C-alpha cells in the first residue's frame, strides 16, 4: 500500500483543466502539472458557500516560468504586483471575485516580462477606466490583455492589464445577452 506523500507525482486529485477544487487541495498539489511541463495558463478563485474554490487550466506551451496567486485583497495584490515586477514578471491573466463582505479579491498569473510596455490598474471607477482607455488604447496603441468588471458597494469597478506589443484585440462590454 502506497502513501500519497511517498510518491506525490502519482497523485493529483484534479485534472489539468479543473473547476470547483478547494484551494487547499489545489495548493497541496500545485506543482504536479508544472513538473510535467504544463504551467498554469488560467486561474480563477472564488467563494462558494463556506469554501473558497478554484478553476483553471494547466497547459503545455503556457508561459513558463510563472507565478500565480489567488484571492488576494487589494493591498496583498499590490504587494505581489510590486514584488513580481521587481523580479521581471508581469500579470498576463487577472480575475476578480468578491469575498463574503463584498470586497474585491484578485487572482492573477504572472509571466516573464519581455520588452513590451504594460500597465495594470485595479479598482477603477468608470471614469478612470474610460480615461485609461482613451490614453493608452486610443492614444498610445496599447491593447487590453485581460479585463474584469465587478461591483463594489453598488459602483462598477474595472481591473485591466494594458499591454503594448502590437497584437490586435477586441473588448466587448456592457452588452445584453442578446447583443
Image: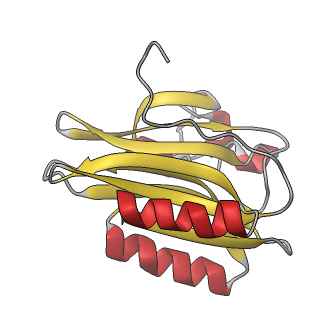
Q: Nearer the viewer, residue 166 or 61?
A: 166
Which x, y percent locates residue 172? Answer: 56, 35
Q: Residue at coordinates 60% horizontally, 60% vertically from top-left?
A: 161
Q: Residue at coordinates 70% horizontally, 68% vertically from top-left?
A: 139
Q: Nearer the viewer, residue 80 or 103?
A: 103
Q: Residue at coordinates 63% horizontally, 36% vertically from top-left?
A: 57
Residue located farthest toward the bottom when viewing the structure as drawn: 86
Q: Nearer the viewer, residue 138 or 4?
A: 138
Q: Is residue 52 left or right of residue 166?
A: left
Residue located farthest toward the top when viewing the structure as drawn: 178
Q: Residue at coordinates 17% horizontally, 38% vertically from top-left?
A: 50
Q: Is residue 117 visible?
A: yes
| Relative vertical location of residue 123 with respect to residue 167 in this rendering, above or below | below
| Relative vertical location of residue 14 with respect to residue 146 in this rendering, above or below | above
| Relative vertical location of residue 3 with respect to residue 96 in this rendering, above or below | above
Q: Is residue 80 left or right of residue 100?
A: right
Which x, y percent locates residue 179? Answer: 50, 18
Q: How is the image coloured?
A: secondary structure
| Quadrant of the frame with the N terminus | top right
Q: Is residue 79 left or right of residue 92?
A: left
Q: Is residue 66 visible?
A: no
Which x, y percent locates residue 106? Answer: 41, 58
Which x, y percent locates residue 160? Answer: 53, 58
The number of callouts visible is 0
| Relative vertical location of residue 89 with respect to residue 87 in this rendering, above or below | above
Amino acid at each position: 500500500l502506497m502513501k500519497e506523500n511517498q510518491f506525490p507525482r502519482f497523485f493529483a486529485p484534479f485534472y489539468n483543466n479543473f473547476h470547483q477544487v478547494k484551494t487547499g487541495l489545489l495548493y497541496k498539489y500545485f506543482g504536479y502539472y508544472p513538473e510535467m511541463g504544463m504551467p498554469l495558463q488560467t486561474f480563477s478563485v472564488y467563494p462558494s458557500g463556506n469554501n473558497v474554490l478554484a478553476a483553471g487550466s494547466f497547459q503545455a506551451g503556457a508561459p513558463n516560468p510563472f507565478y500565480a496567486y489567488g484571492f488576494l485583497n487589494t493591498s496583498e495584490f499590490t504587494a505581489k504586483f510590486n514584488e513580481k515586477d521587481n523580479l521581471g514578471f508581469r500579470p498576463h491573466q487577472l480575475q476578480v471575485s468578491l469575498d463574503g463582505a463584498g470586497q474585491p479579491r484578485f487572482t492573477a498569473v504572472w509571466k516573464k516580462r519581455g520588452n513590451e510596455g504594460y500597465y495594470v490598474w485595479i479598482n477603477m471607477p468608470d471614469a478612470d477606466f474610460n480615461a485609461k482607455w482613451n490614453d493608452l488604447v486610443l492614444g498610445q496603441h496599447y491593447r487590453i490583455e485581460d479585463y474584469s468588471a465587478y461591483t463594489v458597494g453598488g459602483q462598477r469597478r474595472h481591473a485591466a492589464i494594458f499591454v503594448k506589443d502590437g497584437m490586435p484585440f477586441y473588448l466587448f462590454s456592457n452588452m445584453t445577452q442578446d447583443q
